[in-house]
Amino acid sequence: MKSTISYFLIVLIFPLQCSSYLSSLKMGSSLSVEKHEEDVIVSPDGTFSAGFIQIGENAFSFGIWFTELPDSHNSATVVWMANREQPVNGKRSKLSLLKTGNIILLDAGQYNTWSSNTESNVPLELHLKENGNLVLLELQATTILWQSFDFPTNTLLPNQPLTRYTKLVSSRSHSNHSSGFYKLFFDDNNVIRLDYDGPDVSSTYWPPPWLLSWEAGRFNYNSSRIAFLDPLGQLFSSDNYYFFTLDYGMTIQRRLTMDFDGNIRVYSRKNMSQNWYVSYQAILNTCIIHGICGANSTCSYDPKKGKKCSCIPGYKVNNSSDWSYGCEPMLDFTCNNKNESTFLKMQGVEFYGYDKYYYVNNSYKYCETLCLQDCSCKGFQYAEDMDNGVSKCYTKSQLLNGRHSPSFQGITYLRLPKDNNYSKHQSMNVNDHVCFVQLHKDYVKKQENPTVRFFLWLSITIAGLESVCVLVVCVLLIKTSKKSSTAQQQNYHHVALFGFRKFSYLELKKATKNFSEEIGRGGGGVVYKGLLSDQRHVAIKKLHNHNAKQGEGEFLAEIAIIGRLNHMNLIEMLGYCVEGNHRLLVYEYMENGSLAKNLLSNANRLNWCKRYAIALGTARVLAYLHEECLEWILHCDIKPQNILLDSNLHPKLADFGLSKLINRNNLNNDLGFSMIRGTRGYMAPEWVFNLPITSKVDVYSYGIVVLEMITGKSPTMMMNMEGDHDGEVAHNERMVTWVREKKRSTCNWVEEIVDPTMGNDYDASKMEILAIVALDCLEEDRDIRPTMSQVVKMIESHEIDV
Ligand SMILES: *[C@@H]1O[C@H](CO)[C@@H](O)[C@H](O)[C@H]1NC(C)=O
Ligand SMILES: *[C@@H]1O[C@H](CO)[C@@H](O)[C@H](O)[C@H]1NC(C)=O
Ligand SMILES: *[C@@H]1O[C@H](CO)[C@@H](O)[C@H](O)[C@H]1NC(C)=O
Ligand SMILES: *[C@@H]1O[C@H](CO)[C@@H](O)[C@H](O)[C@H]1NC(C)=O
Ligand SMILES: *[C@@H]1O[C@H](CO)[C@@H](O)[C@H](O)[C@H]1NC(C)=O
Ligand SMILES: *[C@@H]1O[C@H](CO)[C@@H](O)[C@H](O)[C@H]1NC(C)=O
Ligand SMILES: *[C@@H]1O[C@H](CO)[C@@H](O)[C@H](O)[C@H]1NC(C)=O
Ligand SMILES: *[C@@H]1O[C@H](CO)[C@@H](O)[C@H](O)[C@H]1NC(C)=O
Ligand SMILES: *[C@@H]1O[C@H](CO)[C@@H](O)[C@H](O)[C@H]1NC(C)=O
């Protein structure tokens, strides 16, 4: 119904205002560049136009674009170009459909710049179809001789296939439409991939080159090599890559574009009077895109500002308006005496590729000497893998694809001439984490154009997550690969096959037998057990008090972000439902219930070893949320009820990301986190004293949870035991003070605090480590508390065979 209405509107607008537009080009006629404003072929529904596009002063290309309103000041969104590399003159250039059946583009009336290379002796016509395909039709047989869909430039329109014969090539820049450095195509293994093809080097960056294709969730046995975006917003590819756009399900204008920054995005808009927004982005952390910052530079990612390029010390930018030119050395790097070099330590910085030598099990000194002896060595990467007792040394002949990565474990040592001014600063400060709360407020203030801003923000925010997150999962998986290869396969699957489902309310109502079996409460909703039609058990959370004013799009966008988080210690979100005022989330179901329940009724199953592993797993996932995902996700409600246990009693954190969804309701007062969140007994003092909320609130709650696991006593129980209720902080403090007191006054303090249900069967030194870590986390001053990754390190350094 809606689409018929807009169809009429457009049909009405066009004949009135643009009566000279053409519906097709007949044999023997031409479109002329001088009349580029009228000589336009328009698709029957008015969505697309084809004609000459001015791309510079006196420079035109023939192409297809989304029709804009007549008074629009937007530059047209070009979806195809015949002559992107070779623009034609603004005088006497024309596109002609010759009597021979060939379409030719003449530059300045003489040079043939482009042609369709077709031939026919039956009547032909050039038509622009409603889907944006420009076709050369044999009128009688209606066979297609030539079509623009077979020669894509940087854009795929819905239902336009990407095949073994076609590829998308990015533009050079926002304003320069000639071919740029990035390509999307099917490779020889039938896998759809992204390559950087720069002036000097080329490399694949997606799917991640260090994964085998099956590890990235791709099939390489299907040789049909076809991919397309359907009009509803789902992409299918024969290699099993697929995704849903955030606005999946709507029939609106869409395009998939290989952008000049090396990312694939799907853009959507309702109609020509609206703005485009990003509804899907393939690569979330844009720093993994090769060549993005050029040579001799590093890319760092910030959820507020997106990526940022900087030259490495001793280098300066070549062209600050186009980072792909990279940075050139400022210092004298001539190398004739090996004593003239020194190395600058860059923690957490990785330069992907271009390794000249690779050595295992050699000392740092050996690696350094190796680099000093080689004049082409620009630096080296050295890492000691504690788990396997192996060290790795890579010497670098070029410094390309540099990026800051909190999950990268090695260190890059940059070669610099001695007597430079940089090494004094010692290591570079990798990143001061940005707090999610600030991001939130920023977003609230700027509401002039909520949708666009939102999606811009979203695309930037999403960018922070995936690749980093994927990377982490990979690192984790690679680490544990020897232990469990099936688990590994499954996890890869999760990472790669992102695409949770939209459920209907009815479906979920049926799955939960009309919301009859309640299994939990809190975090803004009630959780029910459900059984999906595919016989999978799920946990379905029904958010209550939902403000109907919250836009569906915003809800979906946040769900999409949460849905993309992936960690072995995170509950997996399988889908969602948005209908009217109903907002539901569908999660995997954990047979063993929560840590709280197990501590209460099953404490003997939780031996010291399991408790240790739960503490470690929980710390890891919090470190992932805070640091890998750049701290924009604080949990804010860490407690044993939110740590679920899988069949092996491995922890999985639940209810993450909801602080945003739920808090949205009281955003209007611009206070964000004004309302105290969290649960009595687990809350950090900041909440009470109204101090800025940072990730350290989660660290504090984590400390309480660990103490609870060690002692078997819950902080709320402690409160009841002593029988008074003097404020939030008091109950936490009671437990903490009790433990601190024991530690100070007794030598075998650990023995006195451990949960009696563990008996004598525990490793006292491990329990002591946990207790010490917990007390560190419970420091009153949040600046003294460790970060979650420091907690992980502290626990891991004592891990032997858990
Ligand atoms: C475009 O969509 C907006 C919002 O849905 C609507 O108000 C407007 O009338 C539409 N314009 C056209 C030309 O269809
Ligand atoms: C566009 O980029 C190409 C390739 O880098 C370059 O040759 C050309 O001069 C650029 N055109 C404009 C108008 O800047
Ligand atoms: C290969 O992919 C095509 C397109 O997605 C699909 O139709 C076909 O069934 C697939 N073949 C196999 C063997 O999976
Ligand atoms: C960087 O700039 C220098 C000098 O301006 C130039 O010689 C060099 O070719 C440039 N490098 C690249 C990759 O453009
Ligand atoms: C830097 O790049 C911009 C954009 O590509 C270009 O217009 C400009 O001429 C370049 N400047 C130099 C000094 O190369
Ligand atoms: C990067 O630095 C190396 C020297 O370390 C230099 O040879 C190379 O030309 C630089 N690249 C660019 C693009 O300036
Ligand atoms: C480098 O310095 C060391 C000690 O400072 C000296 O023994 C060695 O001879 C020097 N090597 C060269 C090549 O100058
Ligand atoms: C490196 O050393 C470790 C432990 O000493 C050993 O297990 C491993 O096999 C060695 N690796 C190689 C490639 O020599
Ligand atoms: C180091 O800094 C000082 C003063 O800031 C300057 O005079 C000197 O030239 C610099 N040296 C190098 C190698 O850049």
Image: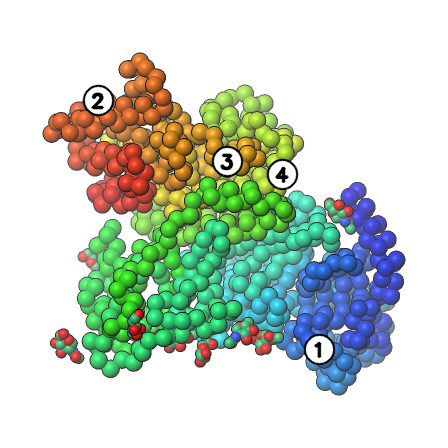
Q: Nearer the viewer, mark 4 or mark 2?
A: 4
The yes-or-no answer for disc 1 within 8 Å of ligand 2 is: no
Query: Which of the two residues, 492 or 370, is positioned nearer the viewer here?
Result: 370
Q: Earlier in the sequence, mark 2 or mark 1?
A: 1
Amino acid type, label 3: Leu
Q: Nearer the viewer, mark 4 or mark 3?
A: 3
Give the left or right position of residue 316, taking residue 546 as reference: left
Disc marking residue 551: 4
Look at mark 3 in the image and give the residue it sits on: 671
Q: Residue at x 43, y 44 (%)?
A: 435
Q: Is residue 344 visible?
A: yes
Q: Quadrant of residue 422?
A: bottom left
Q: Earlier in the sequence, mark 3 or mark 2?
A: 3
Q: CA distance from mark 1 to mark 4?
A: 45 Å
Query: Which of the two residues, 725 or 177, is positioned nearer the viewer here?
Result: 725
Q: Quadrant of ligand 9?
A: bottom left
Q: Earlier in the sequence, mark 1 or mark 3?
A: 1
- The local secondary structure at tag 4 comes to loop
Are the residues at dot 4 and dot 3 in contact (C-beta closer than 8 Å)?
A: no
Look at mark 1 in the image and give the residue it sits on: 58
- The local secondary structure at tag 1 comes to loop
Disc marking residue 756: 2
How crowded pointer 2 is (Cα within 10 Å; few <14, some 14-19, many 20+) is rated as: some
Q: CA distance from mark 3 to mark 2?
A: 44 Å
Establish if 202 lies above or below 512.
below
